[in-house]
């Protein structure tokens, strides 16, 4: 492309060249264009002035024709260069600060009084006033915000921050960092008596409005993974006015429609039956927090699972539940799962299993109580057609939790809102967060999509 410039170098006007110098990284000395070095350390190759407008227009047309058409600013590293840089469970602050950023902690109070953790990733040396379009990123069922930061500097929040976006990570109610209420204490059933319905209609609006208030942006972007993608469908179904507050959203392995119980493979059914039985047992015993002993679960991931032969059993369990992985590193995966795991209300789990058993993305099934709550014998379905924001849906062929046909059904019901859709044949459910190929297969596309929505693709 530099050669194109020299075709016009002898056509002069009275104005100095400035913009092209900045774009090419030339050193400027007076009105001289310089590259390389002479005796003084700079080699002068001549004086140049701005060509006339016709020449400028012709120059840019030819230059753009010669640019590579790969369509995105972010270029992911080779998978061999992507890694989780710990053999322990780091804190969220460690993950952020070791990546070279600052961790800003915020609290959000929902309309129904729950106190939630919200985290902002701040580039060092850049003030809040100089950040770009905000992006809210929320994790899925029993996963906390830390799970987005498990690929080192190739993690999605860091990638988006480097691309100029203002990145926020939300921990919805039930998460170990979001277990407080303005009135309810830890032994009060009301602290846990909710499902993903409340996470959708209360938690997401609280995050969105807090970010809008702090940043002054009228609209923000959203990334939902698994159940947090389903929460977006819930939000727009029940509070469609929030479409106007979102510029667009990415849904990774969207847990909205799910494959009906009997249509799943035996290995997956066996795996989720264990979680289903645990959930039912805890409700009967009035133990409201699933994975309540989270420290024990984390210690099993990092203490027992890496040891032979338990590592084989752990790997088999992960494969049965999440599917066969495309690129999770076995030397890191137990530490990654240990880092991301968190608590969740048993009623969120029960609601999710209802979706699997009934085959519809519907409100909580009170069974004999449905008539009193809803005025009908079955729970109402969520209305997908109320989501009107531009969507990018990405799903995997090896995903046991959100099977490809379920993701396709979700995409069809979202109809005209889906601008982009990508199917990754060998991805399982956790690969979106943990696979060394996720930056190339997924994150490059997210940056392109957000750049398209924000007209940021030429920056």
Image (tube, helix red, strand yellow):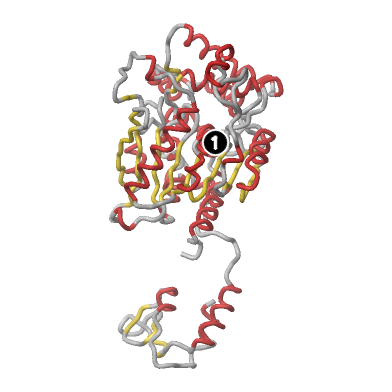
Badge 1 density bin: few <14, some 14–19, many ≥20, Cα 10 Å: many
Residue at the far right: name it: 263
Q: Which residue is mark 1?
A: 237
Q: Is residue 78 shown above or below 364?
A: below
Left/right placement of residue 262 relative to residue 285 reads right
Viewer can see residue 49:
yes
User: Residue 12 location, x and y as percent?
Assistant: 45, 93
Q: What is the secondary structure assignment of the residue under circle 1?
A: helix
Please name whichever residue, 119 or 373, is drawn nearer the observer in this view of the structure.
373
Q: Quadrant of residue 250?
A: top right
Q: Where, quadrant-wise, is the N terminus in this rendering?
A: bottom right
Which quadrant would residue 257 be assigned to in this image?
top right
Q: Nearer the viewer, residue 130 or 23?
A: 130
| Number of on-image labels | 1
Which residue is painted at 40% across and 77% down in the image?
26
- x and y, in percent, of residue 357 in the image: 64, 20
Instruction: Give the residue at x 39% y 80%.
Output: 18
Q: Residue 230 or 137: which is nearer the viewer?
A: 230
Answer yes or no: is residue 434 visible: no
- Across and down, in percent, residue 450 comes to 51, 53
Which of the 4 image quarters holds residue 71? bottom right
Q: Is residue 11 above or below residue 334?
A: below
Residue, far top: 285
Q: Position of residue 211 (x, y in %)?
A: 36, 45
């Amino acid at each position: 492309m530099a050669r194109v410039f020299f075709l016009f170098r002898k056509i002069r006007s009275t104005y100095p060249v400035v913009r092209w110098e900045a774009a090419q990284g030339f050193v400027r000395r007076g009105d001289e264009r310089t590259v390389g070095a002479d005796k003084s350390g700079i080699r002068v190759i001549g004086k140049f002035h701005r060509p006339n407008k016709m020449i400028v227009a012709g120059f840019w047309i030819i230059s753009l024709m010669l640019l590579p058409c790969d369509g995105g600013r972010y270029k992911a590293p080779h998978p061999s260069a992507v890694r989780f840089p710990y053999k322990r469970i780091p804190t969220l602050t460690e993950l952020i600060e070791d990546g070279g950023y600052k961790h800003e902690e915020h609290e959000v109070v929902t309309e129904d009084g729950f106190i939630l953790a919200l985290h902002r990733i701040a580039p060092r040396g850049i003030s809040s006033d100089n950040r770009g379009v905000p992006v809210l990123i929320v994790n899925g069922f029993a996963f906390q915000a830390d799970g987005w930061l498990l690929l080192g500097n190739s993690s999605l929040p860091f990638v988006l921050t480097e691309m100029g976006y203002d990145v926020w990570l939300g921990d919805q109610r039930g998460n170990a960092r979001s277990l407080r209420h303005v009135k309810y204490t830890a032994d009060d059933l009301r602290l846990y008596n909710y499902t993903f319905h409340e996470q959708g209609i209360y938690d997401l609006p609280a995050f969105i409005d807090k970010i809008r208030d702090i940043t002054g942006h009228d609209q923000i972007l959203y990334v939902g993974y698994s159940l947090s993608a389903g929460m977006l469908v819930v939000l727009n179904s029940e509070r469609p006015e929030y479409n106007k507050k979102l510029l667009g959203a990415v849904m990774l392995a969207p847990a909205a429609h799910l494959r009906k119980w009997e249509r799943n493979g035996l290995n997956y059914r066996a795996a989720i039956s264990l979680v289903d039985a645990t959930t039912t047992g805890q409700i009967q015993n009035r133990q409201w927090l699933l994975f309540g002993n989270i420290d024990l679960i984390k210690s099993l991931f990092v203490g027992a699972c890496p040891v032979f032969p338990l590592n084989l059993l752990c790997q088999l369990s992960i494969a049965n539940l999440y599917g066969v992985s495309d690129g999770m590193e076995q030397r890191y995966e137990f530490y990654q799962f240990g880092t991301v795991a968190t608590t969740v209300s048993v009623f969120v789990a029960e609601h999710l299993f209802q979706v699997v058993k009934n085959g519809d993305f519907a409100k909580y099934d009170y069974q004999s109580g449905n008539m009193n709550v809803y005025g009908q014998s079955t729970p109402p379905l969520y209305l997908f057609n109320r989501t009107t924001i531009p969507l990018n849906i990405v799903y995997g062929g090896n995903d046991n939790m959100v099977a490809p046909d379920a993701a396709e059904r979700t995409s069809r019901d979202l109809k005209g809102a889906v601008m982009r859709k990508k199917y990754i044949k060998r991805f399982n459910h956790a690969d979106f967060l943990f696979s060394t190929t996720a930056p190339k297969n997924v994150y490059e596309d997210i940056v392109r999509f957000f750049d398209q929505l924000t007209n940021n693709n030429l920056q």
